[in-house]
Image (spheres, rainbow, N blue to C red):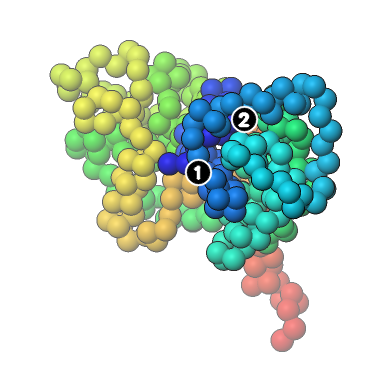
Amino acid sequence: MTTLPITDAFTSYLANERHFSPYTARCYGADLRQFVEFLATEYGIEIESAKEQGALDAATQAKNEGAAFNPNRAIDANFRPATITECVCMSSAEIVRMFLAHLGEQNYSAATMARKIATLRSFYKWADRRGFALGNPMTVIRTPRQAKRLPKAITIEQIERLLATPSDTDVLGRRDRAMLETLYSTGIRVSELVGLQVTDLDLAGEALRVRGKGNKERIVPLGSHAIGAVQRYLEMLKNEPRLANRDSGPLFVNKHGGRLSSRSVRRKLDKYLKQCGLDPSISPHTLRHSFATHLLDNGADLRSVQELLGHQSLSTTQVYTHLTTHRIQDAYNKAHPRAQAS
């Protein structure tokens, strides 16, 4: 695995200071490793940890001494770096564009390319601010325009069929029904679901305390169906000797009493989709999209949905209005006698 002290420091920063999810941090780390491997191949350099740390120290000193940086500078034909860290710290926009051209030859989608650019943009902003890089070459790199994809939502009838599928006769079936009911009732992310503690549950107040992106907390309402499913699950847990003490710890546990993973929730959902004959491409995030779409379809205002979803920006929530607009237009075209030419 190709890493450098500077890229390791950045991924630690994402996890420990920015509180990125493990999945997002891994994606950023993979993008950076790809950039490092490109530079190593381009300059024919073999990575040695001691040399890389020394190069990082030297780059930091150069920045502290006020070395000039031009993000648009051309590659110097005489530039022969001894380490990859030197390449990274002194990278110009031209070097970044070479890397992006290399990626383009591999037929990545526009969305993947945009994420890799976002990774480099975050990395160089951090490196420049911390004094590790001589500057930020990403200030002159543009992200390619992407076609907006509408989030996928399923119908209320399909939701009802899915939620009725898990068994209510054993503790794992009750747990799974409670999880699916909670996902649809609250619209929380699957990472937020598996992070729930027993103490986050407020049955009297019919609410959940949720820790979202950036470790920000929000309170979300919990509907009566979800409350009933969670209560039945917790009641049955009392009869499980290994899992009986449920005053603290994770709310949703595996058969050994440990915290469930996001992947486990996805596997459980896949099983129930197959059992009830629904589209196997439906994901836990589809329940989140369905939650938002159904709220807007039934008159909820956009700001409230934004708060419930934990979106920092209203523009992120506005994508759901396209779904409801399409449905309104479709209903109008079907129902109004003069909507379309005969």
Which of the labelled discs sits on residue 261, or is there none?
none
Which of the labelled discs sits on residue 55, or is there none?
2
Left or right? Give the position of 152 relative to 127.
left
| SS at badge 1 | loop
Q: CA distance from mark 1 to mark 2?
A: 14 Å
Query: Is the N terminus in the top left, top right, bottom left or bottom right quadrant?
Result: top left
Residue matched to label 1: 46
Q: What amino acid is labelled 1 in the image? A: Glu
Residue at point 43%, 50% (across, down): 283
Residue 234 higher or lower than 151, as above or below? above
Instruction: Pick whichever of labels 1 and 2 is earlier in the sequence.
Output: 1
Query: Is the C terminus in the top left, top right, bottom left or bottom right quadrant?
Result: bottom right
Residue at point 32%, 40% (across, down): 264
Q: Position of residue 254 (x, y in %)?
A: 26, 31
Q: In this rendering, does residue 201 appear at all? A: yes
Residue 333 higher or lower than 313, as above or below? below
Residue at point 21%, 31% (across, down): 255
Q: What amino acid is labelled 2 in the image? A: Ala
